[in-house]
Image (tube, rainbow, N blue to C red):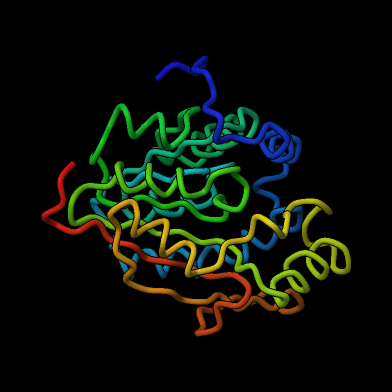
């Protein structure tokens, strides 16, 4: 796939630049991506339990520096990771090479890959990315086209609630400095009902919603019932659905 493809309108250049600027620190567990390092084992366990990983053909949309993509590959999946942040992709490729992990990283959008490889993946993941694009419903529609009938789509994002604003922005970005100020924009947070609607309109069925609880002081994350801040969603493409 060419790295010179024109970006679709469903991409925010400021968001891409933001993550490119931090790319060299992606794998630093004490840096700006510390919360992702702490959340990654829990997220991987959820994905493996809900959809399986060994032998699965997986697409990770918005893969960034490859934290999740590498984790899934280590658990036996055949992983393709896509992103629009060139510096982050460079870091991802180098880290995988150093670790002897095979991941196919590409500069592309979900919409572009859906045109090229519709229904090609057993599992599509899109974690902590939907809140960074102008039209998340269009991304979900592309995820639905990418997964095979009977396959699974797993997303995570932030809920648009006062609690998420207090903890995810005020607390994480300005008080505890776990994330750089401006990482998130509250208006782009997505309610579970909205994500379920995006999926339904794209032909996906919501199977599960699970909250993620994170204690920044102990750096412990666990799955829980509270979806008021950060949550995981499992959606399925019905087995008999048309391509």
Q: Nearer the viewer, residue 41 or 136?
A: 136
The percent position of residue 167, horizontal first and vertical second, equals 75, 73
63 left or right, relative to 24:
left
Using the rendered view, name the quadrant where residue 81 is placed. top left
Q: Seen from this angle, which residue lies furthest bottom? A: 225
Q: Seen from this angle, which residue lies furthest left? A: 240
Q: Nearer the viewer, residue 71 or 132?
A: 132
Using the rendered view, name the quadrant where residue 186 is placed. bottom right
User: Residue at (50%, 27%) from the top-left corner?
Assistant: 107
Q: Quadrant of the N terminus?
A: top left
Q: Nearer the viewer, residue 163 or 82?
A: 163
User: Residue at (78%, 66%) from the top-left corner?
Assistant: 172
Q: Quadrant of the C terminus?
A: top left
Using the rendered view, name the quadrant where residue 158 is placed. bottom right
* Above or below, 9 relative to 43: above
The percent position of residue 140, horizontal first and vertical second, equals 42, 49
User: Residue at (19%, 59%) from the top-left corner?
Assistant: 238
Q: Nearer the viewer, residue 130 or 106?
A: 130
The percent position of residue 236, horizontal first and vertical second, equals 28, 61
């Amino acid at each position: 796939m060419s790295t010179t493809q024109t970006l679709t309108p469903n991409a925010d250049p400021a968001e891409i630049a933001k993550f490119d600027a931090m790319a060299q620190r992606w794998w630093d567990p004490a840096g700006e991506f510390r919360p992702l390092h702490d959340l990654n084992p829990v997220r991987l366990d959820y994905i493996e339990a809900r959809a399986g990983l060994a032998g699965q053909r997986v697409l990770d949309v918005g893969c960034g520096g490859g934290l999740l993509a590498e984790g899934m590959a280590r658990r036996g999946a055949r992983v393709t990771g896509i992103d629009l942040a060139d510096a982050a992709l460079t870091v991802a490729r180098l880290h995988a090479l150093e670790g002897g992990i095979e991941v196919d990283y590409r500069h592309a959008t979900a919409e572009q890959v859906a045109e090229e490889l519709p229904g090609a993946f057993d599992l599509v993941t899109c974690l902590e990315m939907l809140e960074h694009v102008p039209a998340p419903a269009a991304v979900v529609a592309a995820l639905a086209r990418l997964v095979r009938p009977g396959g699974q789509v797993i997303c995570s994002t932030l809920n648009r609630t006062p609690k998420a604003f207090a903890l995810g922005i005020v607390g994480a970005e300005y008080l505890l400095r776990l994330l750089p100020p401006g990482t998130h924009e509250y208006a782009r947070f997505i309610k579970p009902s909205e994500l379920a609607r995006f999926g339904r309109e794209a032909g996906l069925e919501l199977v599960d919603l699970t909250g993620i609880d994170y204690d920044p002081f102990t750096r412990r994350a666990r799955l829980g019932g509270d979806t008021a801040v950060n949550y995981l969603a499992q959606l399925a493409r019905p087995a008999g659905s048309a391509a």
